[in-house]
Amino acid sequence: MNSFDLSGQVALVTGTSGGLGQGMAIGLAEAGADVILVSYSKPVETAGAIEALGRKAYVIEADLSIEDELSKVFEEALSFQGKIDILVNNAGIIRRTPAADHGQQDWHDVIALNLNSVFFLSQLAGRHMIERGSGKIINIASMLSYQGGINVPGYTASKHGVAGLTKALANEWAGKGVQINAIAPGYMETDNTTQIRADENRYRDITARIPAGRWGTPEDLKGPVVFLASSASDYLNGHVLNVDGGWLAR
Ligand code: NAD
């Protein structure tokens, strides 16, 4: 199992106060990594869980939708241990309104965080990783990297963008020792899906369409993220790994 071992590695994970980012940050720490937690609100529980594993957690509070903040965040992250081995671009928001009523602010907020911050943080990390000749970038895509969704035009556009960007960067950086891949989670029980889970009919219809017969949890992303962050996946480039209980197979 040595190729899955992340001992001595430093991971930067965005959006770690709860949900999937929390699960993945803890998963990376379980595999041996120290983790920089970048979050809008303080990720107290996540940091505590990582430290309880005997790993280090370094917290940076930031609003990643502000482009000018990103280079400061990255510089501060580098000051922790002088390197970033793994970047997980997880922070993301969703705004649910029919396309005809979708406000400009909602559109711009979603694109700023879900797509712009993913590119600019990847660019900062990519330069650093290319210089070192190694690194792993993992973007969090979605079923809406493939499908259109309902009432979420900005989110769908952003997640199609994330899948495209994953391939575009992989083409340029695979030969430089930097692997860029994505995870596309299916329907997961987090704050992101509170609104649709509250609608009994939609909840039932979605659950019935998932071959695994249940929604996913943050725990379900631990194995996939460790795989993509470790040398076990050194020949994987530009891949979007669906972790969806079979949703897309149906
Ligand atoms: P969540 O709402 O529980 O977590 C989102 C995280 O992003 C939180 O930690 C939050 O603090 C952080 N965040 C929000 N705005 C931020 C900002 N401006 N700057 C910095 N951090 C910010 O949702 P989640 O489901 O855990 O979502 C994580 C990722 O997974 C997102 O990219 C989401 O699109 C994606 N995703 C979720 C699902 C699902 O079903 N839950 C499915 C597919 C993809």
Image (cartoon, grey):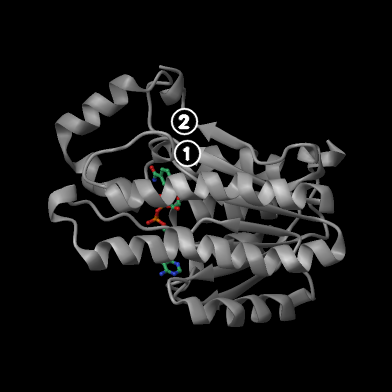
Query: Residue reaching furthest left?
Result: 101
| Separation (CA) of disc 2 from disc 1 | 5 Å
Query: Residue 105's x, y, as percent?
Result: 25, 68
- Asked if labels 1 and 2 touch by Cβ distance under 8 angstroms, the answer is yes
Q: What residue lies at 18% left-to-right and 56% top-to-bottom?
A: 102
Q: What residue lies at 40% left-to-right and 16% top-to-bottom?
A: 250
Mark 1 CB within 8 Å of ligand 1: yes
Residue on which disc 2 sits: 244
Q: The residue under label 2 is which amino acid type?
A: Asp
Q: Is residue 200 left or right of residue 170?
A: left
Q: Secondary structure at mark 1?
A: strand
Q: Secondary structure at mark 2?
A: loop
Q: State whether residue 185 appears in this view.
A: yes
- Against 105, residue 158 (above or below) is above
Q: The residue under label 1 is which amino acid type?
A: Pro
Q: Nearer the viewer, residue 115 or 250?
A: 115
